């Protein structure tokens, strides 16, 4: 299996990106991902009870269709908390992309990222559509991956190439990050494409597994977004023997995990204002969920994050964060090790002597720069 | 009922404070509160699963005794995560105070605030004890309230005077605050004294009610402490008709609520680095607990807190924090009003159209000064 930090679209996919004017800066803000063969889709959406309009429309389309042809995504506007007008705008985005591609609107998924509560300028998207369609190509991923960025300072991209039987299969993921902490939006978006031929069941379970151990294990500021979406398309263009169970499914699952993990880590590395990349391993927990909860409690503690920023080791802040979860920890069972805080990468190992499960959480420190960016964004 | 922002000890109480050397700065760090008549006690401790040694010892004494004579409290050392040595130190503190007062050690409660994981210097407390005892007087509350402070910039104190029948009853509370956000410790402590004659049941239920709506409704950084304690003594010296049910109990309950509320607000006003005092009212919730959960979610959102600091109104950050609680909110039912962010006091009203319960949460903004203080405390 080869993993590389560059987006290389799998067979049968093309992409494009343009500046539609949603962002006043004139930067790229509208992306289209297109699968020539009809593709299966698997999606994960935020657990936030307030969800943006594109999530409602995408979920509706996931119910209506079994195969998908495109994802249209914009940055600069989250299309969230916009009421009925927001739903109509998201619906229009799918229709505007579907018409020139000659597919049904229900075969198009929609994603948005940006400011919450601002009306989506559908007319600008309509005007930009011919250029967006014209730009579609395999190389167009370069513009597409940029068009989904907001305050990201670099694009998050990774590809994996591996064999299923004697066929080469490609997995490619792009993401925009720092979403939960960014000033102008409230979104983490990831799009993953593969030419693998795979059953819906294997696709879904691989994604559930991958997301649970990667995207769901990162945190910047503990603020859960209304727009978080991971969307995956699998179009079968690799022509491999159908992946269902057994060895090929394990290979695919491992590749997807690597792609998700790399994207998740890139998101944390680009967290706004961050000066440290922190890895927290929780060991000997009763379950993965318990380990994850403990690790996230530490990762979301402002006192822990400022201590790392200040390079001041403080076990007390870790201990109080762990105890605050309500999980029945015993003081005498806790073992905590912290690497040197002087380095850019910080490692924290926490053993809780309760079982055999573990989880690894990635996070950043809390810095004056974070506050500056988020206080002065207007 | 008269409420005033000054600690006036009720009849039968005296207090004292000295510099024992626990704090290297030579500031006051050891306080003693003494009730001449045996007093009933009611206490609330942190929900954190990791609890400091003085909490274990105080809980043990609450089981062993029905009447109490003193509270010994120190600042500068939390006596938490110190293992068996910590328990022995807390036990010694009670014994050292009990002996010169001629009372049983189990009639003494213990509280500590300061750095976690640092050995408690019991010898210093022993040496300081004669001076502490000698200083006991009604006016000694001035030194006692200072001796429990750590990074507080002012003392938190309030008294209420009211009549039960024809007897004047006094309630007096002192607190140290900013605990959850302070650099050198992890503690909020409050001590409340009354000369009321009251049943244990009425005392307990009044305190549960008061704490639930005041101390449990404040947050600075969402970090739950290992040492939080509210300790209350009622010694009956006012000679009023026993408070049990009915009108006198309602009067007492209202007075206690006012005292707790005032102390809680003072704690938030002295939050480290804070530039704003924020009041969040959640209305039309299904229950007080639901309203409290929603309000705390907003109050603990770093994005919301930085927006207030930057005086940049941002409804999206409130909406995403509310939705992140998992409570089944409907976008169309939310009504949010925010007062001008230019002022030092900020008011947020959130209506959720789910029921008739409400809660009011008090919090502060998140500022570069908070990070500076908590990063550079060593």
Image: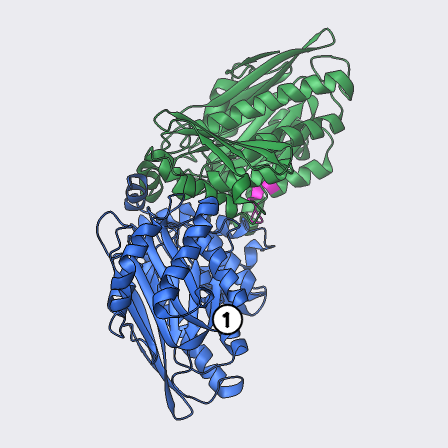
Chain colours: A blue, B green
User: Does residue A128 lie above or below B229 as drawn?
Assistant: below
Q: Nearer the viewer, residue A150 or A296?
A: A150
Return the x and y of residue B311 as percentages of the image width and height. 33, 32
Q: Residue most toward the top?
A: B166
Magenta highlight on residue B62: no
Residue at image point 65% right, 20% down: B254
Res A319 visible = yes
Name the residue carrying label 1: A209
Return the x and y of residue B258 as percentages of the image width and height. 59, 21
Image side of residue A56 versus residue B289, left or right = left
* Magenta span of residues: B48-55
Q: For the C terminus of chain B, which image quadrant?
A: top left
Residue at image point 57% right, 27% down: B191
Q: For the N terminus of chain B, which image quadrant?
A: top right
Image side of residue A359 versus residue B236, left or right = left
Residue at image point 39% right, 28% down: B27
Q: Nearer the viewer, residue A313 or B17?
A: A313
């Amino acid at each position: 299996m080869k993993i590389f930090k560059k987006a290389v679209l799998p067979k049968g996919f093309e992409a494009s990106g343009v500046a539609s004017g949603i962002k006043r800066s004139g930067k790229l803000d509208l992306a289209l991902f297109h699968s020539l063969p009809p593709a299966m889709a698997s999606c994960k959406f935020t657990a936030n009870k307030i969800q943006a309009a594109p999530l409602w429309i995408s979920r509706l389309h996931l119910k209506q269709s079994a195969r998908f042809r495109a994802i249209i995504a914009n940055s600069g506007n989250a299309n969230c908390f916009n009421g009925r007008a927001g739903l109509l705008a998201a619906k229009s985005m799918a229709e505007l992309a579907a018409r020139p591609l000659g597919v049904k609107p229900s075969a198009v998924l929609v994603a948005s990222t940006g400011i919450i509560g601002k009306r989506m300028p559908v007319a600008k998207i309509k005007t930009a559509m011919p250029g967006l369609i014209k730009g579609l190509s395999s190389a167009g991923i370069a513009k597409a991956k940029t068009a989904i960025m907001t305050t990201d300072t670099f694009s998050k991209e990774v590809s994996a190439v591996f064999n299923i039987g004697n066929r080469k299969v490609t997995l490619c993921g792009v993401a925009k990050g720092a979403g939960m902490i960014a000033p102008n939006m409230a979104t983490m978006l990831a799009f993953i494409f593969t030419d693998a031929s795979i059953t819906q069941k294997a696709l879904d379970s691989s994604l559930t597994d991958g997301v649970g151990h990667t995207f769901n294990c990162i945190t910047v500021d503990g603020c859960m977004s209304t727009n978080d979406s991971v969307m995956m398309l699998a179009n079968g263009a690799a022509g491999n023997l159908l992946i269902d169970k057994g060895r090929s499914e394990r290979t695919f699952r491992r590749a997807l995990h690597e792609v998700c993990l790399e994207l998740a880590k890139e998101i944390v590395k680009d967290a706004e204002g961050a000066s440290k990349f922190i890895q927290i391993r929780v060991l000997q927990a009763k379950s993965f969920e318990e380990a994850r909860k403990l690790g996230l409690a530490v990762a979301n503690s402002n006192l822990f994050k400022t201590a790392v920023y200040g390079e001041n080791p403080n076990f007390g802040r870790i201990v109080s964060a762990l105890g605050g979860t309500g999980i029945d920890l015993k003081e005498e069972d806790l073992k905590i090790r912290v690497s040197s805080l002087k380095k850019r990468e910080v490692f924290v190992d926490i053993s809780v002597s309760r079982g055999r499960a573990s989880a690894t959480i990635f996070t950043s420190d809390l810095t004056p720069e974070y506050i500056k960016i988020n206080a002065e964004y207007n």
